[in-house]
Amino acid sequence: MNSRNHSTGNLEPTSEVADFGDRLPVYGLLDNIRSVWNVGSMFRTADAVGLGGLFLSGMTATPPRPDIEKTALGATLSVPWDYWSDSIAAAQRIKEVGLPLVALEQTEGASDWDRFDFPFPHCFVVGHEVRGVRPEILDLADHVVEIPMVGIKHSLNVAVSFGVLVYAIRRKWQEIGG
């Protein structure tokens, strides 16, 4: 895979760090994201941090679409991506190739994202804006992390959560000399 080019239909998860070139050795799995603007925002953020790639799944919209581009601003052409109709099958494939799966979800026993030692490489998953990460994917996850909430609201917008998480992951990668 040429990590600098747009990719659809053939982005294969890999646990080989060497395949990432200068990209962060991390993938994101978008599990049934309903808002095209959230998808575009996540593409733009993925580009900003040099994410290894995105797996779009289920109802998650895929490029090319003008409504995605409204927030992606061209990042759909710089971030490798693939679409899987079944997010569970995508998560299973990610696990089959040996990548740890880290779910971002508020659950009993979830680790604080800021204190978590992210494995490298890995794939993290964010879920539907209302329902979150599917329970079947949570069952497959090696780890679950959450962003603690101290205000009266119990969650952040999924694209905001994605951004908070990927910048934390990038910082952890840089701390270990990546």
Image (cartoon, rainbow, N blue to C red):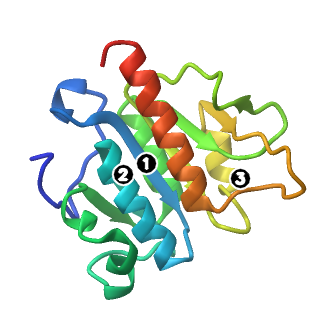
As drawn, 163 above or below 130:
above
Q: Earlier in the sequence, mark 1 or mark 3?
A: 1
Spot occupied by residue 49 in the image (x, y as percentages of width and height): 34, 43
User: Could you say which disc has been placed on residue 28 in the image?
Assistant: 1
Residue on which disc 2 sits: 46
Spot occupied by residue 61 in the image (x, y as percentages of width and height): 42, 77
Which of these two is toward me, 97 or 166? 166
Quadrant location, the C terminus? top left
User: In the image, what residue occupies the spot 28% across and 43% down?
Assistant: 50
Q: What's the residue type where badge 1 is placed?
A: Gly
Q: Are marks 2 and 1 in contact (CB under 8 Å)?
A: yes
Residue on which disc 3 sits: 135
Residue at mark 2 to residue at mark 1: CA–CA distance: 9 Å
Q: Is residue 85 visible?
A: no
Mark 1 or mark 3, which is nearer to you? 1
Q: What's the residue type where badge 2 is placed?
A: Ala
As drawn, 95 above or below 10:
above
Mark 3 or mark 2, which is nearer to you? 2
User: In the image, what residue occupies the spot 18% across and 33% down?
Assistant: 22
